[in-house]
Image (cartoon, rainbow, N blue to C red):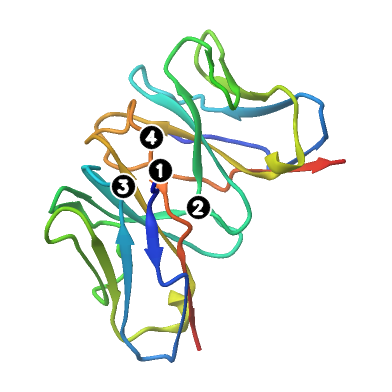
Amino acid sequence: GAGVSQSPRYKVAKRGQDVALRCDPISGHVSLFWYQQALGQGPEFLTYFQNEAQLDKSGLPSDRFFAERPEGSVSTLKIQRTQQEDSAVYLCASSQRQGLDNSPLHFGNGTRLTVT
Amino acid sequence: DAKTTQPNSMESNEEEPVHLPCNHSTISGTDYIHWYRQLPSQGPEYVIHGLTSNVNNRMASLAIAEDRKSSTLILHRATLRDAAVYYCILYGGSQGNLIFGKGTKLSVKP
């Protein structure tokens, strides 16, 4: 069946440009998460949604990062005025239920952002 | 947040069993133990999880120590496709997200 889909797969941006990364979660999944993964590191939490509500954005590194999920399905992560340190793989994951006790995360393959 | 400790890397031979250890001495009574793995150039994928009892599924087995301060992910017959980074993560119901560490990079030799 269809999994979590992320687009674009690769994005190259010049420093200072704005970028928008899209995530299509599995249909019907309530929870949606964004993670950032630097080379050689584990994924780091950015933010998460339950339906359209953004319940936690404590991991967003600066106010240049913004995420939305207006209709409780597709989500967009926007980065304004990109900097070189924003270069990373951005992973989206969805989960069927609110809690993760018995509802695993399903990850997409990520968007690799390179800021030059 | 309760933390886990895993070896940075391990090696295995193809078709042999692999035991991936994880220490979590500060685990609380309500923390689930989750394992995910990440193949090269892919997002992490769920492997298995448990609370107190040992668990088996088609991918692996999870052995949990009686005091729950450690656990072991068991791959019964490693294949080349099992080469990945394996993450052991504690999840308590009050937190919203999974917190990943650096994991164990498993190499499988033919």
2 or 3: mark nearer the eye: 3
- Badge 1, how many Cα within 10 Å: few under 14, some, many 20+? few
Residue marked by disc 2? B43
User: Which x, y percent locates residue A27?
Assistant: 26, 46
- Badge 4, how many Cα within 10 Å: few under 14, some, many 20+? many
- Residue A74's label in the rendered image is none
Q: Secondary structure at mark 3?
A: loop
What's the distance in space between the residues labelled 3 and 1, CA to CA? 9 Å
Residue marked by disc 4? A104
What's the distance in space between the residues labelled 2 and 3, CA to CA? 14 Å
> Looking at the image, is B60 positioned above or below residue A49?
above
Amino acid type shown at disc 1? Gly
What's the distance in space between the residues labelled 4 and 1, CA to CA? 16 Å
At 53% from the left edge and 12% from the top edge, which residue is drawn? B54
> Looking at the image, is B2 positioned above or below residue B63?
below
Amino acid type shown at disc 2? Gly
Amino acid type shown at disc 3? Ile
What's the distance in space between the residues labelled 2 and 4, CA to CA? 13 Å
Q: Secondary structure at mark 1?
A: loop
Residue marked by disc 3? A26
Residue marked by disc 1? A1
Amino acid type shown at disc 4? Pro
Front-lying residue, A27 or B7: A27
> In the figure, is residue B91 to the left or right of B57?
left
Earlier in the chain: of badge 3 and badge 1, it is 1
